[in-house]
Image (cartoon, rainbow, N blue to C red):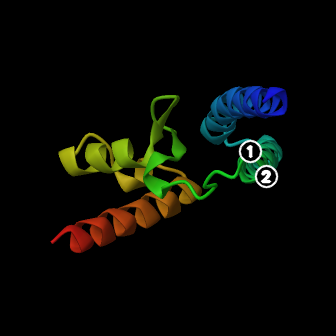
Amino acid sequence: MRAEKDIRLRIDLLEGQSSSIAKMLAKAIRDHNEAAFKEYSERLAANRSRVEELLWVLGEKAGQSVLDLQVAAASNNSSLSVKEVIEKLKAGELKMDDLSPDAQAMVRKGALEMKNNNAHKD
């Protein structure tokens, strides 16, 4: 029981760090700082990998919906879920060109996931 609590605390810590790294990554994107972008991308990927390992240890599903993943919105220095970005795109509040290439790829995957989810509901 104690070990499970420690693992969950570690996951919370890593997710908090990931949020901070994502903000720094968004700043690097805005500043067109490729070196910082590369460093923060690698750190974010490493943190995500650690979280997935810890979730696996807990026996939980590590595969998260693409729609729940956070992406940096370069235009306004914030991070939104892929689903929120898709909604803003639909409403015309955002354009794909406002997003980084990585964020665009995640949004495309999210749109495909939404389409597949809707097809399975019908």
Residue 2 quadrant: top right
Contact (Cβ within 8 Å) of mark 2 with mark 1: yes
Residue type indicated by callout 1: Val
Q: At 60% from the left edge and 37% from the top edge, which residue is drawn?
A: 30
Quadrant of the image containing the N terminus = top right
**Residue 48: x %, y % from top left:** 72, 47
Q: At 67% from the left edge and 43% from the top edge, which residue is drawn?
A: 32
Looking at the rendered structure, the secondary structure element under dot 2 is helix
**Residue 60: x %, y % from top left:** 64, 51
**Residue 31: x %, y % from top left:** 66, 35
Quadrant of the image containing the C terminus = bottom left
Q: Is residue 28 above or below residue 63?
A: above
**Residue 72: x %, y % from top left:** 54, 40
Looking at the rendered structure, the secondary structure element under dot 1 is helix
Q: Along the line of sight, which residue is nearer the eye, 88 or 63?
A: 63
Q: At 65% from the left edge and 30% from the top edge, which residue is drawn?
A: 19
Q: Along the line of sight, which residue is nearer the eye, 51 or 24?
A: 51
Q: At 32% from the left edge and 72% from the top edge, which residue is drawn?
A: 116
Q: Which residue is mark 2?
A: 53
Rounded to the nearest whole Å, what is the CA distance between mark 2 and mark 1?
5 Å
Residue 107 quadrant: bottom left
Q: Residues within 10 Å of mark 2 (few under 14, many from 20)?
A: some
- Looking at the image, the residue that sits furthest to the left is 122
Q: Is residue 66 left or right of residue 114?
A: right
Q: Which residue is mark 1?
A: 51
